[in-house]
Amino acid sequence: MDLTLWTIVIAIGALAIGGLSKGVLGVGLPMVATPILSMFAPIPDVVAVTYFPILVSNLYQALAGGHLAIMARRFAPMMLVTVMATPVGTYSLVRLSPGTVSILLGLAVAFFAAASLARPTLRVSPRWERPVSIAAGAIGGFFGGMVLIGGPAVIMLMVALHLKKEEFIGAMGLVYLSMLIPAGVSLVGFGVLSTQHIVPGLISLIPVGLALVLGQWVRGRIDEDRFRKVLLVSMVVIGLNLIRRGIF
């Protein structure tokens, strides 16, 4: 990455906006930061650096939610599938061409953002919760291992289950951890994450952490729906641009 003043400002801004989204909505850090940063650096390096703040923020979210044991029992099969699918995604990251990874990343971000904007009325009955959650875990694990964006399928499942806000935030943090821990092992094993990424990764904790705390503070003080819509529209544009870059 060419560390000009302009790219440093954009990088800090991307991490901060991602942290703010994480604090306000409980999701959004990798979906915001990774696509923006990948415009200025190779996607494997972006994944390696952002791994640190994504891991720490989800660990905090899972522990702070207050529903750790209940959510762990409920979504245990889903998390097991997520763990198994994650190395497949990391293997794809190192084997596929940068253009193909960019297209897949763009598709995941744009599709999720557009689907969330449409706000479809989804509901999963208790009878179908386990098979649907297993499918969501497989998709989430694959994209989580590839670009640390395992959220789209998982988020749509959690919305369809109509979890309460704090249950949603705690469950997302827990499921993300089931993806991030094996993802870290895979990233190191496949040579994506190395010692050169440790310092920038730890530094990236600062803007993310500050913005996360700010986001939690403003969660009940701003129009959450408006913030969500602005963020999702931006993600659609960024996702489409990644697809364009991958094709051309």
Image (tube, rainbow, N blue to C red):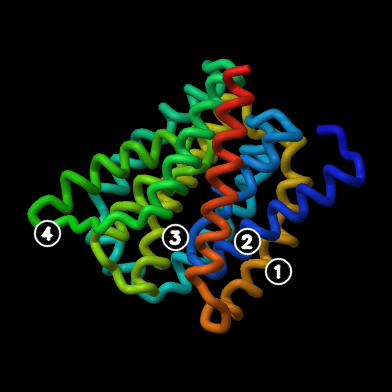
Q: In this view, does 242 lie above or below 18?
A: above
Crowding at dot 3, Cα within 10 Å, few <14 / some 14-19 / many 20+, comes out as many
Provide the secondary structure element on which disc 2 rests: helix
Provide the secondary structure element on which disc 1 rests: helix
Between the C-alphas of marks 3 and 2, the distance is 14 Å
**Residue 183 at x, y percent in the picture:** 49, 39
Q: Does any portion of residue 65 appear in the rendered image?
A: yes
Crowding at dot 1, Cα within 10 Å, few <14 / some 14-19 / many 20+, comes out as some
Q: Which mark is residue 173?
A: 3
**Residue 220 at x, y percent in the picture:** 52, 82
Residue indicated by mark 2: 19
Q: Which amino acid does label 3 sit on?
A: Gly
Residue indicated by mark 4: 126
Provide the secondary structure element on which disc 3 rests: helix
Sequence-wise, the earlier of marks 4 and 2 is 2
Q: Which mark is residue 210?
A: 1
Q: Nearer the viewer, residue 91 or 152?
A: 152
Between the C-alphas of marks 4 and 1, the distance is 38 Å
Q: Does any portion of residue 203 appear in the rendered image?
A: no
- Residue contact between numbered discs 3 and 1, judged by CB atoms under 8 Å: no
Q: In which quarter of the image is residue 239?
A: top right
Between the C-alphas of marks 4 and 2, the distance is 33 Å
